[in-house]
Amino acid sequence: MTKVTAQLSVSLDGCYAGPRHTGDGDWMDSAESAGFFRVTRWVTHAMSWRERQGFAGGERDTNSDIVAESFGAAGAYVMGRRMADGGEIPWGEEPPFRAPVFVVTHRPRETLVRGGGTSFTYVTDGVASAVAQARAAAGGRDVAVAGGGSLVRQVLRAGLLDELDLHIVPVVLGGGLRLFDAGSGGGLGGGPDGGADAGLGLGEKEAIELTPTRVVATPEVTHIRYAVRGRAPLVLDDRGSGGGPTRTGE
C-alpha cells in the first residue's frame, strides 16, 4: 500500500541546514549550505548515492544500504519549488529521482521532462493536490516528500504523512533551519516558493504523536523511523494521586 514518507538529516540540535541564506551571493558559499552539507555528509559518502548520481567511489555500508532502500521504495516525489529550482542545473539531464516529481508552488510552469524517467510537474493548488497526484503516479510504491523542511511541516500539518525518517548526525550546529521551528523557512526551503510557513498549527495543549519503528545506529548517523500516529491532546498525568504505594513511614 502506498505510504507518504519523508526523511531529513538533522543535527543534534535539530537543524537540517545552517542559517537561511537570503543574500545575493552564491548559495554554495553560504552558512546555510555549510550546515546542509555537514548533516548530509553520510549520504554523499554512500556508494549507492554516488552510483545514482553517476559518480565513482563511496562506501558500501549500512548507510549506503539505507540510501538504496529509500530510492527503491519511492514511486513518486513531492518537493518545494526552491529545492526544484536549486537542483535543476546540478541534477542535469538525468536527475537521480527516476520517477515523477510534483513540485508545490504558487508559480505555474509547464511540466519539465528529463531523462531516466524523471519529470517535474508544477502544482499550484496546494500540497494536498500534489500528494494526491503523486499517489496516483506512484504505482503502489511510496510517495517520498523530498523537502525542504517547510514542505515536510505542511504535509505533517495536513495529516498526510504516514512515516518520518530522521537521520540524526552527531554534530551541534548551534543555529540554522530547524525542522520543527514554525516559519524558519525551508531548505532548502521556506513555503512552496521559499517564503515563511505557519508551522504545524497545533493548539496550546495538542501534539503530534509518533511511534519509533526502527533504529539503526552507525558512527556517522543514527537512523530513526517513526510511524506518524497523528494529533492528540496533551493530558496531565495523575502524578501523586494514583493511589500507588508510598514509602514506608509516610
Image: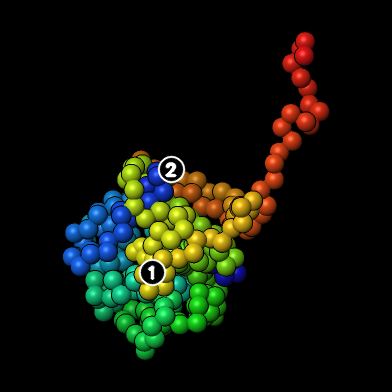
Indicate the quadrant where residue 47 lies: bottom left
Which secondary structure, mark 2? strand
| Image quadrant where one finds the N terminus | bottom right
What residue type is disc 2 on?
Ala
Residue shown at 31% from the left, 66% from the top: 52
Q: Where's residue 148, x and y in %?
A: 40, 64
Indicate the quadrant where residue 190 lies: bottom left
Q: Residue 195 carries which label?
A: 1
Observer able to see residue 37: no
Residue shown at 24% from the left, 54% from the top: 31
Tell me: residue 229, above or below residue 54: above
Please tell me how crowded label 2 is: few (under 14), some (14-19), or many (20+) other residues with Cα within 10 Å. Answer: few
Q: How many labels does the image show?
A: 2
| Residue under numbered circle 2 | 217
Residue shown at 23% from the left, 64% from the top: 23
Which secondary structure, mark 1? loop
Closer to the N terminus: mark 1 or mark 2? 1
| Image quadrant where one finds the C terminus | top right
Query: In the visual, does 155 lie left or right of 237?
Result: left
Q: Which of 209 and 140 is in front in this view?
A: 209
Q: Where's residue 141, x and y in %?
A: 52, 71
Q: Where's residue 178, x and y in %?
A: 40, 53
Q: Where's residue 209, x and y in %?
A: 61, 52
Query: In the visual, does 174 lie left or right of 132?
Result: left
Identity of the residue furthest to the top in this view: 249
